[in-house]
Amino acid sequence: MSTEPQDADDDLKERVTNFLRRNFPQIQMHGGSAAIQHLDRESGEVSIALGGACSGCGISPMTIQAIKSRMVKEIPEINKVNADTGMGGDGMGGDGGMSPSFPGETTSDDDGGSDEGPQAPF
């Protein structure tokens, strides 16, 4: 009959979204994105996915750590933050398997077995 729990969930989701916008404008400035994947008000757990240019970015682990440490301090209802770039790194299972891509890069399934990783775009 009451929409109070739904309103509380919507309010928490809005505060998490605003946190991401307010604290991490550089994510967008560098072609990345951050989105809430899952939010559980009861457990205080939120899962954030970093995408776009964040996938394959060398400083994304630092961005993830900053999100984790700041969000639990600024939003009292949040107890745990899972964040991931989809590269199998930190937090959300690691089975995303997305490959990094860079402007102008071409990919080939048979690259001769090079183990050096992708070349920087600069």
Image: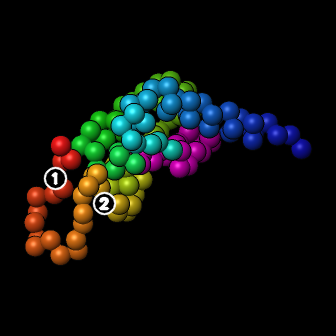
**Residue in view at x 35 percent, y 45 percent:** 54
Mark closer to the observer (2, 1): 1
Instruction: Judge the density around disc 2: few (<14), some (14-19), many (≥20) Cα neighbours within 10 Å.
Output: few
Mark 2 sits on what residue? 99
In the picture, measured across the screen, residue 13 lies left or right of residue 27, that is right
**Mark with earlier residue (2, 1):** 2
Quadrant in which the N terminus is drawn: top right
Q: Please, what is the three-letter code of the amino acid marked with disc 2?
A: Ser
Helix, strand or loop: magenta stretch: strand
Is 63 one of the magenta-colored residues? no
Which residue sits at x=45%, y=48%? Answer: 49
Asked whether the viewer can see residue 89, the reply is: no
Residue 119: numbered disc: 1
Q: Given the image, on which type of amino acid does mark 1 rest?
A: Gln
Give whichever of 28, 73 is nearer the camera: 28
State the separation of the CA atoms marked 2 and 1. Answer: 13 Å
Q: Where does the C terminus fall, quadrant-wise?
A: top left
Q: Position of residue 37 (x, y in %)?
A: 53, 49
Image quadrant assignment for residue 62: top left
Which residue is at the far front? 104
Residue under the image location 16 percent in, 57 percent down: 117
Q: Which residues are magenta?
A: 36-51
